[in-house]
């Protein structure tokens, strides 16, 4: 059977097997067995046609009501979604409810958003309202770094250059991480700001991760879309 074209989309007919009532004759059975329907092709985040086995992206994380997403569960799902070098970093020092960080590299900003949205959907499907990530990922549409807070872990979606520059896995793997003092009832605003300046001096933003350059790139991207 030949493929047909609908608009600009090539569509391949899918032959469906149909059970035959015993009362039908041979000719009627042959007619029913040749019936067909078509399934529109699906494309991945980079516009490539997706194989049938990869279509149900939203189902890579099982829906278990009220159960927190485990870091290893997220790691496995992101790998299935095409994420590269997905790793779990267990924190040496617990940070509030967070005990682990998950890092994954995406092929493009669109790929980052796709993976982040699926984790957000999984939080919603499980009814995990205590996870702030259930309301959406942190970061803008074309950002090179998105973040989803899953309550017990935080997932970082990054482009390869950003991930290499910031080396956050190294930071979160340290026994004693550079950190800011807690503000509540301990230090005043001025002291907090002074501590922040000292922290930036001791641990400056990497030279190859220029925030101002990124802001210019974001502005140019908006102009191109207009």
Image (cartoon, helix red, strand yellow):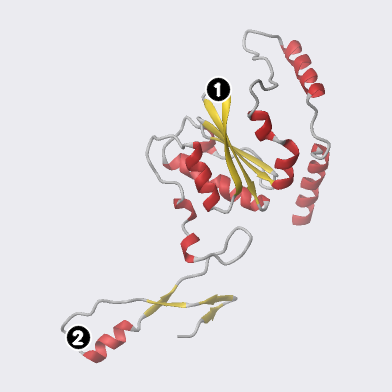
The relative height of residue 225 versus residue 104 in the rendered view (above or below) is below
Q: Dot 1 surroundings within 10 Å: few (below 14), some, or many (20 or more)?
A: few
- Residue 29 pos. (x, y %): 25, 86
Residue visible at 57% across and 27% down in the picture: 91
Quarter of image, res 82: bottom right
Determine the residue positioned at 35% across, 81% down: 35
Q: Residue at x 54, y 21 (%)?
A: 96
Kind of element beneath mark 2: loop
State whether residue 97 is above or below residue 146: above
Quadrant of image for the C terminus: bottom right
Which is closer to the viewer, label 2 or label 1?
Answer: 1
Q: Quadrant of the N terminus?
A: bottom left
In the displayed structure, 172 sits above or below 76; it is above
Q: Out of 152 and 141, give the one closest to the viewer.
A: 152
In the image, 23 versus 82, the foreground residue is 82
Per the image, the residue denoted by label 2 is: 24
């Amino acid at each position: 059977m030949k493929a047909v074209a609908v608009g600009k989309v090539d569509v391949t007919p899918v032959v469906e097997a149909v059970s035959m009532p015993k009362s039908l004759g041979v000719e009627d059975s042959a007619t029913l067995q040749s019936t067909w329907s078509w399934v529109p092709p699906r494309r991945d985040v980079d516009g490539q046609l997706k194989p049938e086995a990869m279509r149900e992206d939203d189902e890579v994380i099982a829906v278990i009501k009220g159960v927190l997403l485990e870091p290893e569960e997220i790691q496995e799902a992101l790998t299935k979604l095409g994420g590269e070098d997905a790793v779990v970093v267990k924190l040496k020092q617990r940070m509030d409810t967070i005990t682990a960080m998950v890092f994954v590299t995406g092929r493009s900003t669109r790929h980052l958003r796709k993976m982040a949205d699926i984790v957000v959907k999984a939080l919603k499907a499980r009814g995990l309202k205590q996870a702030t990530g259930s309301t959406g990922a942190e970061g803008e549409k074309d950002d090179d770094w998105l973040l989803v807070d899953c309550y017990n872990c935080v997932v970082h979606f990054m482009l390869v250059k950003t991930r290499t520059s910031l080396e956050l896995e190294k930071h979160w793997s340290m026994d004693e991480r550079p950190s800011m003092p807690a503000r509540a009832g301990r230090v005043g605003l001025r002291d907090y700001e002074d501590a922040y300046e000292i922290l930036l001096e001791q641990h400056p933003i990497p030279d190859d991760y220029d925030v101002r350059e990124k802001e210019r790139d974001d502005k140019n991207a908006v102009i191109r879309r207009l």
